[in-house]
Amino acid sequence: MTTTPNDPTTALPGRPPVVDMATWQAARDELLVREKAHTREGDALAAARRRLPMVEFDGTVEVVGPDGPVPFLDLFQGRHELVVYKHMWYDGAPHQGQCEGCTTTAWHLEDASYLNARGVSYAVLTTGRWDEVASYVEFMGYTQPWYSVRDVAGPVGAPMGYLTCFLRDGDRVFLTYSTTGRGNERVNGSMGLLDMTPYGRGETWEDNPEGWPEGRHACWSWRSDADGNATWGPTSRPVPQWTRPGATPVETLGRNGHHH
């Protein structure tokens, strides 16, 4: 049965009905059937993905990293497979002005050890000039390898905002898979966890019950001021960056992202 709390001052603005454990378990079991079907369909899609054909291209094409120009083959680090995230780039923008979605995607894979253990390397590519990219990577504290692919044709360069997979066979390199948009959510574990919570992501497109908090635009919470308030401006930063030493409220950024 559904009950109503006696003290209205403790009630959140819109929330699930309160029931006994048996009622909850029955509803949970019913949803589990749908979740399992979703999982099995995902398995079937992954199986089809592994059966996609692939495209060979020149693996000696050069990208620019901390050691200067290197052949794309180097990004495999001797492994057979490579996953890259193609990070969008706004020339000359302050660090907090780079793409919110790309910022959070890049942040969510700080350690690729488990990929490496399965013979898969990981890197981030972007079309920014290397000097700007290097400054941004240092500012954000990213730990994965970054490379500039400015003026490099696809499938290494070209449109950004994609997760792309490659296979190496000796010195031969192949494009095997690429996705964008919500396909990129695969990297972002925070999204999956938010989808499990009562209030979800808090975005306008979500199908929520009546009375739920009003949704906002995608990525609205990914930049904040020093107090954690979602905002964009001279004193705002990508949320994870506030955890870095020296990130103080009085520190501002100039047009080119340099500290003042």
Image (cartoon, grey):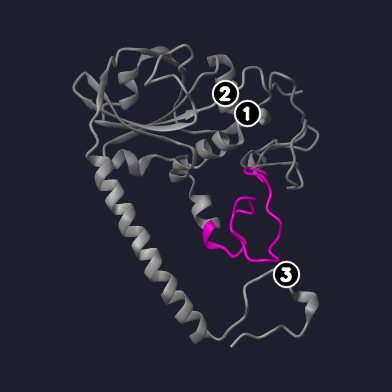
Q: Taking 168 as reference, is 148 above or below it?
A: above
Between the C-alphas of marks 3 and 1, the distance is 34 Å
The quadrant where residue 122 appears: top left
The kind of secondary structure element at disc 1 is loop
- Counting from the top left corner in percent of width and height, residue 182 is at 48, 42
- Check residue 205 for magenta coloring: yes
The kind of secondary structure element at disc 2 is loop
Q: Earlier in the sequence, mark 2 or mark 1?
A: 2
Q: Quickly name the residue at label 3.
A: 12
- Counting from the top left corner in percent of width and height, residue 77 is at 31, 26
Q: What residue type is labelled 3?
A: Leu
Residue range in magenta is 195-221
Say which mark, if any, is on residue 140. none
- Counting from the top left corner in percent of width and height, residue 207 is at 59, 58
Q: Quickly name the residue at label 1.
A: 98
- Counting from the top left corner in percent of width and height, residue 178 is at 37, 33
Q: Which of marks 3 and 1 is in front?
A: 3
Question: Mark 3 and mark 2 in contact (Cβ < 8 Å)?
Answer: no
Question: In the orientation shown, which residue stands out farthest toward the left?
Answer: 170
Q: Which of marks 2 and 3 is nearer the N terminus?
A: 3
Q: Which amino acid does label 1 sit on?
A: Gln
Q: Which amino acid does label 2 sit on?
A: Trp
The kind of secondary structure element at disc 3 is loop
**Relative side of 242 to 42, left or right:** right
